[in-house]
Amino acid sequence: MRWCPSSALHLLRTVRLRSCPRRGRNTLPLWIREIWAYMRLLVQSFYFNSLTDSDVVFDSFFEPLFYTVDYVTRWFGSLFVWLVVILVSSILVICYVILLPMVFKTYPTEWIAWHICYGHWNLVMIVFHYYKAITTSPGYPPTEKNDSPFVSVCKRCIVPKPARTHHCGICNRCILKMDHHCPWLNNCVGHLNHRYFFSFCVALTLGCVYCSISGRDLFLDAYNAIETIKHLDVVKPGVPVTGMGVLIGLLPPGQTNYQTPAPPYTFKDKMIHKSIIYMWVLTSTVAVALGALTTWHAVLITRGETSIERHINSRENKRLAKRGRVYRNPFNYGRLNNWKNFLGVEKRSHWLTRVLLPSGHTPPGDGLTWEVFPVKKDLIPV
């Protein structure tokens, strides 16, 4: 065993103490000396003992880069949240100001009732789950001494880590059943708010698909109207106006323009058309991107694993496959049981009250202990 300090913190303090007698003669700013001491610590960490492996070298070498990314993500977290609020609010303004009056004028009563009921249910689900996802703590392991079982010790927090717990460099603390840190929530996705995050993704995807399908014809009309106006300053004399010319209000059907100029294409008309195009493009893009993310998380939930555990399980599966053995996820309770456990469904009525309607119930368990390799039966009764 080579020379080894008690801890990295002790080494950093030692480097600083050695430079204390020379501070009077050193003209470099304090922040430069601290960075230099930190870089020396990183270099020394490459060979501080005989247990050093490739993972230690990789972590030490890229530590400044990881720290910078974590710091930038932490700083921009609030901006991402406000961006989500602004984008969703802009779609709501277009729906209430432009689309809803059009629905009342042109749609039959049954379709008006459908759009109002579904649209407002979807809106409530989006707002409720997003608010809960950003305000609910993901769950943290206790820092004081307790009797809870743990599987390792966090090398950064220097506290015991229960099963399925991982350290978040952005939040700078350990998270129970950590899935990932979401910048759009400015919060970690963990044991206590994982369901809120997934339900928000599902609700927002459904809302974007709904707006994209419902507004497709309006988008095509608005796009064609703007393209027609770009190439048509006035209607050519003697040419009958039909089709899109009638739609955008240039002339009545069949009327020709000999001396009368076309009615002006007002600023209000232009903004209405551009707003419809903006809504359709934004909702269609988000529906595809967020739909793919939601589908991936649904697959992970079905398998009984998180995003982090997916990488860990894949690595373990490859490692055991080389030895001719098969790896089993110890937290996979079966497809249906995984969903029941994740959604907190304990009886049939909960599929309505806890899944299809907003619910603030907590997930089963405390996130500290987990049943491993359970018997194949319904863990949660239906």
Image: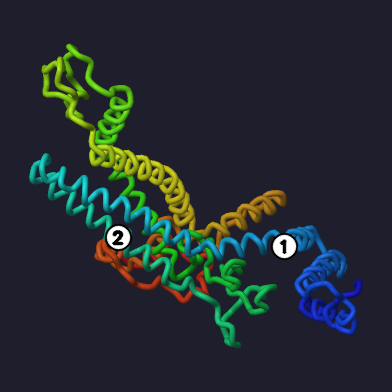
Q: How many marks?
A: 2
Asked if 371 appears above or below 14 in the picture, the reply is above
In this orientation, which residue lies closer to the viewer: 51 or 210? 210
Label 1 or label 2, whichever comes before in sequence order: 1
Question: Quadrant of the image for the C terminus?
Answer: bottom left
Amino acid bearing label 1 = Pro
Q: Residue at x 25, y 33 (%)?
A: 217
Which of the pair 192/300 is nearer the observer? 192
Residue at left offset 17%, top offset 18%: 241
- Horizontal side, residue 176 vs residue 289: left or right: right
Residue bearing the label numbered 2: 125
Residue 64's tag is 1
Where in the figure is residue 5, as x and y percent of width and height?
84, 78
Residue 52, x across and y down, in percent: 83, 64
Q: Assess disc 1: are there few (<14), some (14-19) or many (≥20) residues with their C-alpha within 10 Å of its C-alpha.
A: some
Q: Tag 2: Cα neighbours inside 10 Å, few (<14), some, or many (≥20)? A: many
User: Disc 1 and disc 2: Cα gap in Å?
Assistant: 40 Å
Tag 2: amino acid:
Met
